[in-house]
Image: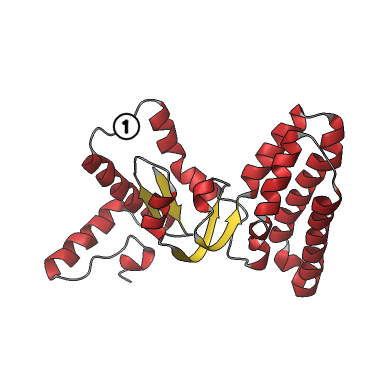
Amino acid sequence: MLPRSSSGLVLFLTDRHRSRDVIVRVLGESFAGTLVSDFYAAYNGLDCAKQRCLVHLLRELAKLREELPWQSVRAFIQPLIDLFRDAIQLGKDREKLGHAGFHQAYKLIIDRFDDLMLKTRTRHPDCLRIWKRLYKHCDELFTFLDDSRVPADNNSTERDIRSLAATRSDGGTHRADWSAAAFARIKSIIVTGMKNGVRFIEYGTEVVRAKLRGERLPLPLATATDTS
């Protein structure tokens, strides 16, 4: 089960596969928004702006820092960790720095990244693997600095799906496709309502009223149940 979310709308999808075909079926070949994801290959071919999750990347780099020779850590891994941490902090300091200060700091971040990619010479297989990944996705690492509406990570989605992942690990699965689809729809409504401060029972009442009046069914958003 995978959630797709914006700041106020969450869609859970249940499927037997995690292939690109599933993503295209939900989002289409060309997505108008910005896709925030990890480096899972199924997302690569989608035609849209992308932001790769820097928290996922930092976790992997931190693990490599504990495992690799100190020479590789000092020359490549630790500078990358420092760079992406500074980039995330820069995103948080955008308003405080002002327009000119932010863009000057942004340019320094990009210059540091370019220097690392161009000047670092390492033959360690794990460092080469990370280098190739960053080179391939270099235009998808700092989108959140270009657009303040885009987060640097997909932590919100991870939190939305955490309870479901834990249930699945404990053996909680669906025996029929219809029950899995029904559960995903209900979960989408509940979590979207929670993000908008809409109680499930109140939303359900509005749906019943709209159905009886022959009106379009509302979404579980704050404006859908606002009667003031």
Q: Give neighbour class at mark 1: few <14, some 14-19, many 20+ (Cα, 10 Å).
A: few
| Image location of residue 174, percent across then percent down | 28, 34
Residue 213 position (above or below residue 152): below
Q: Position of 134 compared to 177: left or right?
A: right
Q: Which secondary structure lies at badge 1?
A: loop
Kindly identify the residue that appears in the image at 76 percent across and 44 percent down: 81
Which quarter of the figure is the N terminus placed in? Answer: top left
* Residue furthest out toward the bottom: 100
Residue 153, compared with residue 76, is above or below; it is below
Residue at 77%, 53% in the rendered image: 86
The answer, for residue 156, to whether it is visible in the render is yes
Q: Quadrant of the C terminus?
A: bottom left
Give x and y (percent) for residue 212: 12, 65
Q: What percent of the width, then of the height, locates residue 202?
A: 27, 57
Judged left or right of residue 163, residue 53 is right
Q: Is residue 197 visible?
A: no
Q: Nearer the viewer, residue 116 or 144?
A: 116
Residue 126, how many percent across, how many down? 72, 35
Q: Give the residue type at disc 1.
A: Thr
Q: Total label count?
A: 1
Model colouring: secondary structure
Q: Which residue is mark 1?
A: 173
Left or right placement of residue 83 versus residue 49 in this view: right
Q: Considering only vertical position in the picture, is 106 above or below 38?
A: below
Tell me what residue is drawn at x 52 percent, y 58 percent: 35
Direction left: furthest residue? 212
Residue at 36% x, 68% y: name it: 223
The quadrant where residue 15 appears: top left
